């Protein structure tokens, strides 16, 4: 078991390259199931979830090779339609094989998903949409089994704008007969990236990035060659790190358009942000102003940045209120921030954060992926030493995070616990 040890108090300065987006790479990897032939996917981050996706593709019969950040996937000989519990329970995105397998092979058997324990995230909207497209759905012993000779187009209204549901239905509809309309679809940049990749494969898609997506199904798709978009949540995490350490960081590859809600709130807190040659420069203020936020689906403030922003507000000069409206169990990091001295009170879906002068280092424990990042940020800004255990969560979504922070001047290392 490993842990991260941070000797805080260092001002971060320099450049860091933002890795490919995990939340885009995973659906793109599974989209290769839609077409036989050799696919090439570039800018894929080296993460635990990516390794899990690679294992799942291999179990299904794909030939997968990796060289640096480039994956080659040959999906010509898909032999299995089952995504087993042992893999799906560790990564909820595994459920995204459901749409591609059903659309191409007419059959899929997928374990009900697991992942971070941040709240209930049912897949009922995925299944409701597939049923509307003609699939028969059976739930048996923890598995979803879906069958259809060929899916057909349908008008589908999503009760909530689910990202995974939009992705699953978008992939399935690409090979369906006729036109599918997704109403109240998710608008996240990762949806736009998936739609762009599917279009490169020959799909006919309009409206990605809006709440109404129209897909005209085609008879077959072609192999994919595509580069994954930069990770907006990793970029946001480093932006908050610059703010918390009064640093000066250039984020190479970060895209302003993907980060508008976060940028607006950081600027409200006093952070200086500018665009420079395919990079964002972030300069932390001498005094952090308190800011209220409420998480919302894109283009609102991202729930995946709530924990990191809470760490920032914990050392702001005043009181802020953070409201979590996306997941009902995403304040688990609060107890650990309190161990570092944070003054936070939770009432229902809101947390009142009263700024303190500084964090004080202490042993803490990560509870989920973004909570892990939040604790790293607090440790970087803390006096003395912070030790973070259960960092396997961190490795699911951040590529070599301790190495990147060391390049910026942080005193951080990974050690055996």
Image: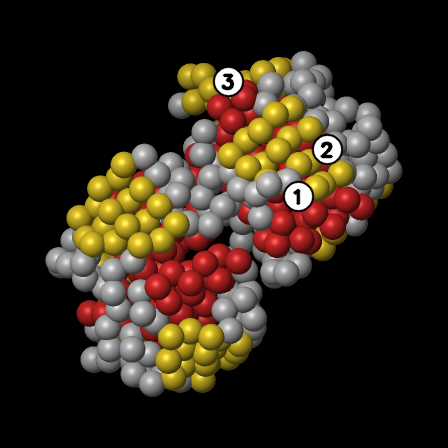
Q: Earlier in the sequence, mark 2 or mark 3?
A: 2
Q: Using the numbered discs, state the Cα–Cα distance from disc 2 to disc 3 in whole angstroms.
A: 24 Å
| Left or right: 154 in relation to 73 | right
Q: Is residue 364 visible?
A: no
Of residues 257 and 307, the one drawn nearer to the viewer in this rendering: 257
Mark 2 or 3, closer to the camera? 2
Q: Position of residue 33 (x, y in %)?
A: 25, 60
**Sooner in the amino-acid sequence: mark 1 or mark 2:** 1
Q: Which residue is mark 3?
A: 413
At 61% across and 25% down in the image, what residue appears? 14
What's the CA distance linking mark 3 and mark 1?
31 Å
Q: CA distance from mark 1 to mark 2?
A: 12 Å
Provide the secondary structure element on which disc 2 rests.
strand
Q: Position of residue 27 (x, y in %)?
A: 38, 56
Q: Residue 24 vs residue 293: left or right?
A: left
Q: In the figure, 395 relative to 171: above or below?
A: above
In the rendered image of this protein, does residue 73 appear above or below residue 417? below
Q: Which residue is mark 2?
A: 283
Residue beneath disc 1: 275
Q: Residue furthest right?
A: 318
The nearer-to-camera label among 3 and 1 is: 1
| Mark 2 surroundings: few (<14), some (14-19) or many (≥20) residues within 10 A | many
Of the image marks 3 and 1, the number of the one nearer the N terminus: 1
The picture places residue 249, in percent across and down from the top left corner, at 64, 30
Closer-to-camera residue (277/175)? 277
Task: Identify the element where label 1 is drawn.
Answer: strand
Q: Would residue 202 be seen by someone viewing this image from the given angle?
A: yes
Q: Is residue 400 left or right of residue 61?
A: right
Quadrant in which the N terminus is drawn: top left
Dots 2 and 3: beta carbons under 8 Å?
A: no
């Amino acid at each position: 078991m490993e842990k991260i040890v941070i000797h805080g108090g260092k001002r971060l300065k320099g450049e860091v390259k933002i890795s490919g987006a995990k939340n885009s790479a995973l659906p793109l990897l599974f989209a290769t199931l839609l077409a036989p032939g050799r696919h090439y996917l570039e800018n894929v981050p080296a993460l635990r979830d990516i390794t899990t996706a690679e294992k799942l593709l291999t179990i299904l019969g794909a030939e997968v090779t990796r060289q640096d950040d480039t994956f080659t996937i040959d999906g010509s000989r898909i032999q299995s339609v089952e995504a087993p519990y042992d893999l799906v329970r560790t990564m909820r995105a595994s459920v995204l094989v459901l749409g591609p397998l059903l659309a191409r092979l007419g059959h899929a058997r997928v374990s009900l998903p697991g992942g971070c324990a941040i709240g209930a995230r049912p897949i009922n909207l995925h299944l409701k949409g597939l049923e509307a497209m003609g699939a028969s759905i059976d739930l048996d012993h923890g598995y979803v089994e879906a069958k259809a000779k060929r899916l057909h187009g349908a008008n589908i209204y999503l009760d909530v704008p689910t990202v995974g549901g939009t992705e699953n239905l978008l992939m399935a509809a690409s090979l369906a007969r006729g036109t599918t309309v997704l109403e109240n679809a998710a608008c996240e940049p990762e949806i736009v990236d998936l739609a762009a990749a599917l279009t490169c494969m020959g799909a006919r898609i309009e409206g990605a990035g809006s709440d109404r997506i129209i897909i005209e199904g085609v008879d077959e798709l072609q192999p994919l060659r595509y580069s994954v978009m930069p990770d907006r949540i990793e970029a946001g995490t480093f932006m908050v790190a610059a703010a918390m350490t009064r640093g000066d960081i250039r984020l190479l590859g970060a895209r302003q358009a993907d980060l508008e809600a976060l940028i607006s709130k950081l600027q409200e807190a006093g952070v200086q942000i500018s665009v420079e040659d395919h990079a964002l420069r972030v300069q932390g203020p001498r005094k952090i102003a308190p800011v209220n936020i409420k998480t919302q689906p894109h283009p609102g403030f991202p729930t995946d940045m709530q924990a990191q922003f809470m760490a920032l507000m914990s050392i702001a000069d005043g009181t802020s209120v953070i409201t979590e409206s996306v997941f009902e169990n995403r304040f688990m990091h609060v107890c650990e921030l309190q161990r570092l001295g944070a003054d936070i009170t939770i009432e229902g879906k809101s947390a009142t954060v009263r700024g303190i002068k500084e964090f004080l280092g202490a042993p803490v424990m990560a509870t989920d992926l973004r909570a892990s990042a939040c604790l790293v940020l607090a440790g970087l800004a803390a006096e003395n030493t912070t030790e973070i255990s259960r960092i396997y969560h961190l490795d699911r979504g951040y590529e070599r995070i301790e190495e990147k922070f060391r390049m910026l001047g942080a005193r951080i290392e990974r050690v055996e616990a």
